[in-house]
Image (cartoon, grey):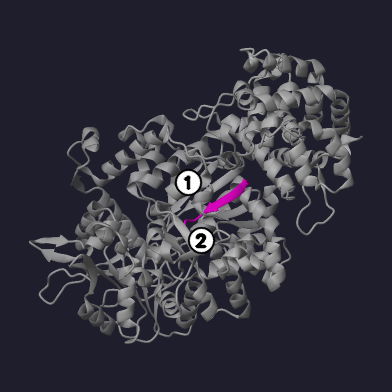
Amino acid sequence: MNLINLLRAKSEREGEEGKNILLRDHVIETLERAKQLKEFVENNGDTITYPLLKNEKFFTALAIALILHDFGKISYDFQKRVHGKESDDWKELGAFLRPLREVKVRDHEVLSSIWASILLDDDIVEWKEWFSKIRTAILLHHYNEYYVGYQDLMEIVQGYLEDINKYLEFILNNWNYIEKFLNDLFNEIERRFSKNFVRNALNVIGSCIRREKVEELLRKIQDRDDDISEFAEFYKIDNENPDYDFIVFLGCLRRCDYSASGEVNLEMGKRIKEIYADLNKKIKEKIGVKSIWQEKLLEEVEPLKSIVLIAPTGSGKTEFALLWNAKNTRKMIYTLPLRVALNDLFKRFKDNYFDDFVDLLHSTAFIEYLEEEQRGRELDVGKQMTVASLLSSPVLLTTPDQVFLTSLNYYGSDKVIAVYPLSSIIIDEIQTYDPEMASIIIKTLKIVQDLGGAVLVMTATLPPYFEPFFFEDKSKDYDIPEKFRLNFKKIDTKNVRGDVKNYNLKRHKIEIAKGERGEYNWLVEYVKEGDQYSIKINKKAIEKYLEKYEGKNVFIVLNNVSKAIEVYKLLKNKYLNVYILHSRLIEKEKDRRIKEIKEKLSRNERVIVVATQIIEASVDLDFDVMITEVSTIDSQVQRWGRIYRNRHQNYDEELPNIVIFVGKSKNGKIEVDRGTKAIYDKRVVEKTIEVLQEFEGKTVSYEDERSMIDKVFNKVVEVVDPDMIKLIGNTATLKDIYVAEIKRNLEFLKYFTVEKKSKAQRLFRRIAGIQVVILAVMKIYGDEIDKAFAEIIENPESNKKTWKEIENEIGVNKLELKKKLYEYSINIPIFYLDDLMRLIKHEFKGFYVLGVDEEDAKLIYEFGLDEFMKDKLKANSEEDKLEAQIL
């Protein structure tokens, strides 16, 4: 019997009948990925500065771990599962493995760590520390109970005492077969690889292989020796003081393993410099100029230096980021908080700059790949998604939750951390993050910098509370501990302002809306009626302004979905081309509306769009006028960025193009409505109003808008939090309060860990979302395939069907069907779930299936889920009801 030709690592894949993946082949494929990683580091030379990746011993240790990581799959249950009991191979192998039928260790990596204990000899002093790391990395390369517990041989043995006893007895009794398998495997690896680190790994393991090691461990277990853990040490992980060298090692092991399983390359073979060849020329040709301000600014930036770029909206920050990374010649990871904006950037990068070298990573990225396929590009969508998820792309566009949660210590963060030393990371729209999320990002960026990663933060409006963490001179003023300091250089476009689009333009003229008697006015407010809150609209004011701006394209921005719906209902039958946009619309309908709005604007038709703050960073539209509720100053400036966006001269009309409703005048003060206070920090909103009053009637420039933000955060307010009073006193500036809150959060994060990435993402996004598919909408507005798919989804038993069975039934592939699920779904906040549960029919492939009648489906299609939900909220207290209505 020849085990090398019988032992499998995987079962045959769906659609690849007869393709069996042998254990030897999987090991070889993982080593091939390690070779790709090493060549990537070598090819890109001085741009990778992390010492560990320049160390030959690191790659030798990685090869040792890859050779041994799946040996635990040598078990009766696993091999029976991947072979199929009827095969001739299984009959032979099953007879050999029959003594292991009673070994019920569920996780193969546990048995693999036992193999690493008997095949690696800690008596070899120069390898002892690495052997402990190798065993622990093997144990943790899949999620198991040891991730949140101790990593110790004694713990493993006590947890599976009888199983491991039988397993070691089997190895001893069949040592001749085991030894032949090892020799055959090593010979095959040696035949395939000439790289020193692989051959060194074989020599190290070969020098350790002794039957006596198995006998010794078995004796210790049977005698209940206290020193079992000394037989083979495991690495002690300290989550409070992480060893990032070990985390990078674990991440590289898992990236090699997962990319081999997914049959994709871990890293590309060519140098990054080749991808960026002629980028300057391409950018200039696209813009139609001979020189660009980005090049001038980059002359003062040394390669691999982390920087903060402050530049106006629409000025070319994205092109700056590309040229900055071309100077670094590294992998680029570009982050934006909203998927819609990322999707647009993906098409732009692909068509203009990078062709097939750019990938996209977020929860619905596969839809963009399907569209690329439909545009004629030949690709394997599944493999493309694997490449993106492993951060293997030379240029990757992604949402922050995919790469900035590593400081939360979730399982799998090592895969991301392992890429930091190879990467330049760009953070766009950093002003969208509040102090809690800012703390997570700051701590993560510290990890990136400590591992030799480079960071570019880009923003039109850098929130002042980031400055003490970003810049050395500011850190001293706020006594920021070294462990939280980021070493950034500020790059300000004011030095080249004459060349920067939108820098010198005065684009926005501000008016604060007032009533007939000159008092400050409200746009929409919540009014209590019995035990419910209803929404009251200032119809007179809205109609007055729409009449005043007749013929102009108008954005009306409300602070939550419920308000937006009520304003839309008021206007939709009185004016032409009225649209509503918010986050809880059917995805397909939201996309259709945005496309239709752009088409009508291009034909110079008047359009009125009622929206929520979704438009602050996600929709590339240029409108004439904005009517908006007040929000925090940074939010306001972002909203204004949609107005007079792509113009070439100052705004010089008499009428203002930004009209802000700040709230009621009451007893000499402005009373902000409850809905706004529930979403935004009341302190910042109140100080925003004070600063807006200073600029009322003025046409403001980009520098004015930056000045407004600084003014707001330097306003002094009363400190309410007792713990905060102890730190900064009874009064402080908003900036001081936010900095103190971030420092406190950072200290808390030192002791914080979550088990899984999904939990980390929920924390980062503040309110968890769930996908709800609306079948009735699918049936009413879908085509014949949509309707046929809806019939399948409607049957609760369909969830038991495989995607292959559903594909065969409908004649459409799995990814196209998943796309339809997303198109007819809404991402809703978790707090809606209790009220929706009685209408949830069942779950289908990760989506909740909402059962509604035809009338309600039409309501949801036009207005979104909130209109359907408003009479179904069952919150207990009055405050809970208001909060549910608002959020």
Q: Residue at x 29, y 77 (%)?
A: 653
Dividing the picture into quadrants, the one containing residue 30 is: top right
Q: Residues within 10 Å of mark 2 (few under 14, many from 20)?
A: many
Circle 2 SS class: helix
Q: Nearer the viewer, residue 551 or 671?
A: 671
Report x, y in % for residue 382: 68, 58
- Measured along the vertical axis of the image, is residue 117 above or below residue 773? above
Q: Nearer the viewer, residue 445 or 672?
A: 672
Q: Is residue 183 magenta?
A: no
Apparent side of residue 597 relative to residue 43 in the rendered image (left or right): left
Apparent side of residue 173 relative to residue 720 in the rendered image (left or right): right
Q: Residue at x 49, y 30 (%)?
A: 239
Q: Amino acid at mark 2?
A: Arg
Extreme residue in the left direction: 667
Marker count (numbered): 2
Apparent side of residue 382 relative to residue 307 in the rendered image (left or right): right
Q: What whole-number distance in Å separates the C-alpha atoms at marks 1 and 2?
A: 20 Å
Report x, y in % for residue 359: 63, 57
Circle 1 SS class: helix
Q: Residues within 10 Å of mark 1 (few under 14, many from 20)?
A: some
Q: Nearer the viewer, residue 279 or 116?
A: 116
Extreme residue in the right direction: 1
Dividing the picture into quadrants, the one containing residue 254 is: top right
Name the quarter where the C terminus is drawn. Answer: bottom left
Q: Which residue is mark 1?
A: 759
Q: Amino acid at mark 1?
A: Lys
Circles 1 and 2: CB atoms closer than 8 Å: no
Q: Is residue 333 magenta?
A: yes
Apparent side of residue 379 relative to residue 827 in the rendered image (left or right): right
- Give, as a single range, the part of the protein colored magenta: 329-337
The first of marks 1 and 2 along the sequence is 2
Q: Which residue is mark 2?
A: 339
